Amino acid sequence: MSDITRVALDAMGGDNAPYAMVQGAVDAAGRRKDIKIFLVGQEEVVRSELEKYSYSKEQIEVVNATEVIETAEPPVMAIRRKKDSSIVVGMNMVKQGKADAFVSAGSSGAVLVGGQGIVGRIKGVERPPLAPLMPTKKGVSLLIDCGANVDARSSHLVQFAKMGSIYMKNALGIEKPRVAIVNIGAEEEKGNALVKETFPLLKECEDINFIGSIEAREIPHGEADVIVCEAFVGNVILKLFEGVGSVLIGEIKKGLMSTLRSKIGALLIKPALKETVKAFDASEYGGAPLLGLNGLVVKTHGSSTAKEVSNSIIQCVTFKEQNINEKIREAIQEKVK
């Protein structure tokens, strides 16, 4: 079983549950034979959806969870009260060693609270950050933090930089990931109080490749591999990035269909355009891992399609194979000593 990556998937979380979750699980199982997926949710509902597909019975198993945490519910109260919810049951599977990872498109707040309260933080980790991969001109960059810690301190950002570097080195094979802090200018004296306090600490950090500040306009160009910021800034960057991308693609399609000449041109450029659009599709890279926990927790978009769910499950295999949690544990606890 050690060669199998066991993923507990929240079958009830997200706007498109349960059908996108079930379809994503079936797709992931078809792509990789070294995955075991536990569909955690209301058994009757999940099985009814699962019956629509042909799949390996050895790879997909339904785990009953009678309750569902809704997006609007207060996260702390929901985690405490709904012990038989898909989020709590799935996270307890990770805590108890029955699963290697938990993936959810459900309530972000509940996933963050459950991740810290149930799965637990690695000793020495002050705040676990959410860290999605963002497509750029040069490949992908890791945005850390994008939603978990709105009121972060400088020491938190330094840990984000270290954990992000470990992730990019081991998951993507980048030997010396370039680390930059989000700022409003390139000069060291620029920025708010948090950035000014954090900059010299990152500069002195010997176990990261810190290259200085990065302005938002440089992010799509891939000028850094690890982009460090607190969650408010990170979430704004991520949502704006996604929104602009969606509008641009929509306007390009609209322009290509506007005249007969443009439609003919569209047929000629369609293959190249399709590849370009795919490269900048964030769903190709899975969800955002909550780094610094005792087990892997991955948060995907609330509007996740089956493709994003499938890619998020596959993402867990790399995380386990590269032993990223243990490497983060070693790096953080070495500094604690």
Image (cartoon, grey):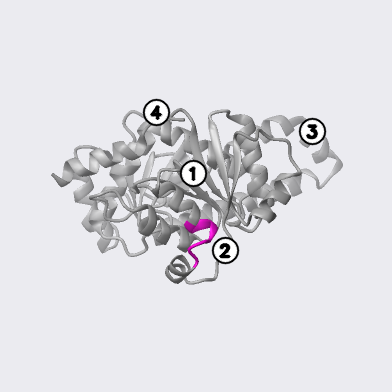
Q: Type of residue at label 4?
A: Gly
Where residue 3 appears, as percent x and y from the top left, is 46, 27
Q: Is residue 32 above or below residue 51?
A: above
How far separated are the C-alphas under marks 2 and 4?
40 Å
Seen from the viewer's position, the closer of residues 253 and 335 is 335
What segment carries the magenta color?
A: 82-88
**Between tags 3 and 4, which lies in front?**
4
Q: Type of residue at label 1?
A: Met
Question: Going 80% across and 45% down the picture, which residue do you hit?
Answer: 257
How far separated are the C-alphas under marks 2 and 1?
33 Å
How far separated are the C-alphas under marks 3 and 1?
29 Å
Q: Type of residue at label 2?
A: Glu
Question: Going 62% across and 41% down the picture, which residue do you hit?
Answer: 25
Q: Type of residue at label 3?
A: Leu
How far separated are the C-alphas under marks 3 and 4?
37 Å
How far separated are the C-alphas under marks 2 and 3?
49 Å
- Residue on which disc 2 sits: 67
Seen from the viewer's position, the closer of residues 150 and 56 is 56
Which element is circle 2 on?
Answer: loop
Q: Earlier in the sequence, mark 3 or mark 4?
A: 4
- Residue on which disc 4 sits: 173
- Residue on which disc 3 sits: 267
Q: Earlier in the sequence, mark 3 or mark 1?
A: 1
**Between tags 2 and 4, which lies in front?**
2
Specify the quadrant of the image occupied by residue 30. top right
The answer to whether residue 131 is visible is no
Question: Going 77% across and 36% down the picture, which residue do you hit?
Answer: 266
Drawn side of residue 118 relative to residue 220, left or right? left
